[in-house]
Image (cartoon, rainbow, N blue to C red):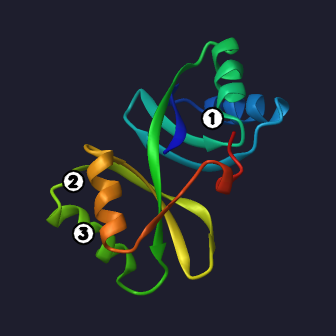
């Protein structure tokens, strides 16, 4: 499991820039991000180089931030690779709460971040199908 930061952020010009600047000034590297927005606010999801330090920076800046566990799956980087994983989860009864891609790839794999209803079931299904996950250390996350 990988630790993800979730941040409530006002949907106003400059708010995202200010947050990323604060993290940069603290020496935090962003590995992946996703934003889901509404009219007034957005939920920014981040994988960063040092989750605890980033959380402290965000807390000091009065951002509403929390840490959530997610699973990073190495998806075969071929046509139908993602469909294979999604079909496996659907057939196994695992509900996907959200997912987003991770920048970068390696050795015939793309990486997808999953938040699911049943992580233990997800891991068992992936193992049965010969698919792997990526750990914090492999992503350069502390």
In the picture shown, does residue 127 fall above or below 33? below
Q: Nearer the viewer, mark 3 or mark 1?
A: 3
Residue at horizontal 35%, vertical 65%? Answer: 126
Q: Is residue 115 left or right of residue 113?
A: left
Task: Specify few, some or many for label 1: CA neighbours under 10 Å numbering under 14, 14-19, or 20 or more.
Answer: some
In primary-sequence order, the first of circles 3 and 2 is 3
User: Which tag is nearer the camera, tag 2 or tag 1?
Assistant: 2
Q: What number is the disc on residue 47?
A: none
Q: Which of the pair 113/8 is nearer the observer?
A: 113
> Any mark on residue 16, and which?
1
**Residue at x 44%, y 50% (from the top left corner):** 71
- Tell me how far mark 3 sits from mark 2, CA to CA: 9 Å
Which residue does the numbered mark 2 point to in the structure image? 94
C-alpha distance separating marks 3 and 1: 35 Å
The residue closer to the viewer here, 103 or 74, is 74
Disc 3 secondary structure class: helix
**Residue 104 appears left or right of 134:** right
Q: Which residue lies under the disc numbered 3?
A: 88
């Amino acid at each position: 499991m990988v630790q993800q930061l979730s941040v409530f952020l006002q949907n106003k010009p400059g708010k995202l820039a200010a947050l990323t600047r604060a993290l940069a000034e603290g020496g935090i590297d962003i590995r992946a991000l996703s934003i889901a927005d509404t009219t007034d606010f957005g939920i920014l999801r981040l994988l960063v180089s040092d989750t605890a330090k980033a959380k402290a920076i965000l807390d000091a800046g009065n951002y509403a931030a929390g840490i959530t566990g997610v699973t990073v799956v190495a998806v075969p980087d071929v046509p139908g690779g993602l469909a294979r994983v999604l079909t496996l989860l659907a057939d196994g009864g695992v509900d996907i709460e959200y997912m987003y891609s991770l920048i970068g790839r390696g050795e015939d794999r793309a990486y997808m971040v999953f938040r699911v209803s049943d992580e233990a079931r997800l891991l068992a299904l992936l193992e049965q199908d010969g698919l792997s996950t990526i750990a914090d250390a492999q992503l350069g996350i502390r």
